[in-house]
């Protein structure tokens, strides 16, 4: 199972740190360690630079995005959205300042979820702590690097 964390970064920080994703990644890495001596301050910083996730809007946008595609099954319950197709599954759990995407099977369905999220809001920052990868879903700078 692959797991990704997505944060919607506020416009001024997205623009300012666009060419330096490692700075955002460093802050988010520190944020994951709740035993950190400065955790409360780090939590305030993360909440300051991230947007609240508009759960209902994102759910409806993704549901509409999957509506015209053949053989996709989409289930929604509260802040959880599950998409399935041909042995692939992606589950998106939405919290206040964070979305977590769990994916199984071929990469097609998670790629589609990420593509739809990028068209909904281009300021998402994605991390994969299992392999240490991170980047913007859509880069605010022209020399966009691939995530993965």
Image (cartoon, helix red, strand yellow):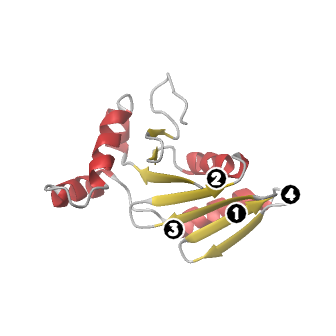
Residue, x 57% and y 71% (percent of image)?
A: 80
Sequence-earlier tag: 3 or 2: 3
- In the picture, the disc for residue 55 is 3
Label at residue 70: 4
Tag 1 residue: 83
Sequence-first tag of 1 and 2: 1
Give SS at disc 3: helix
Q: Nearer the viewer, residue 97 or 22?
A: 22
Helix, strand, or loop for circle 4? loop
Give the spatial CA distance, label 4 vs label 2: 15 Å
Left or right: where 40 falls relative to 129: left
Q: How far apart are the alpha carbons under marks 3 and 4?
A: 25 Å
> Which residue in the structure is indicated by mark 2?
113
CB atoms at circles 3 and 1 under 8 Å apart?
no
Q: Is residue 82 left or right of residue 96?
A: right
* Residue 49 x, y percent position in the rendering: 30, 50
């Amino acid at each position: 199972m692959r797991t990704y964390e997505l944060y919607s970064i506020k416009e001024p920080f997205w623009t300012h740190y666009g060419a330096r994703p490692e700075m955002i990644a460093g802050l988010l890495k520190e944020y994951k360690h709740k035993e950190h001596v400065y955790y409360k301050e780090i939590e305030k910083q993360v909440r300051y630079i991230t947007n609240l996730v508009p759960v209902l809007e994102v759910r409806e946008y993704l549901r509409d995005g999957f509506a015209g595609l053949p053989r996709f099954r989409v289930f929604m319950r509260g802040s959880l959205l599950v998409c399935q197709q041909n042995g692939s599954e992606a589950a998106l759990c939405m919290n206040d300042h964070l979305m977590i995407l769990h994916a199984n099977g071929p990469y097609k369905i998670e790629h589609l979820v990420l593509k739809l999220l990028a068209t909904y809001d281009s300021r998402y920052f994605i991390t994969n702590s299992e392999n240490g990868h991170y980047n913007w879903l859509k880069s605010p700078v022209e020399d966009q690097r691939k995530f993965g």
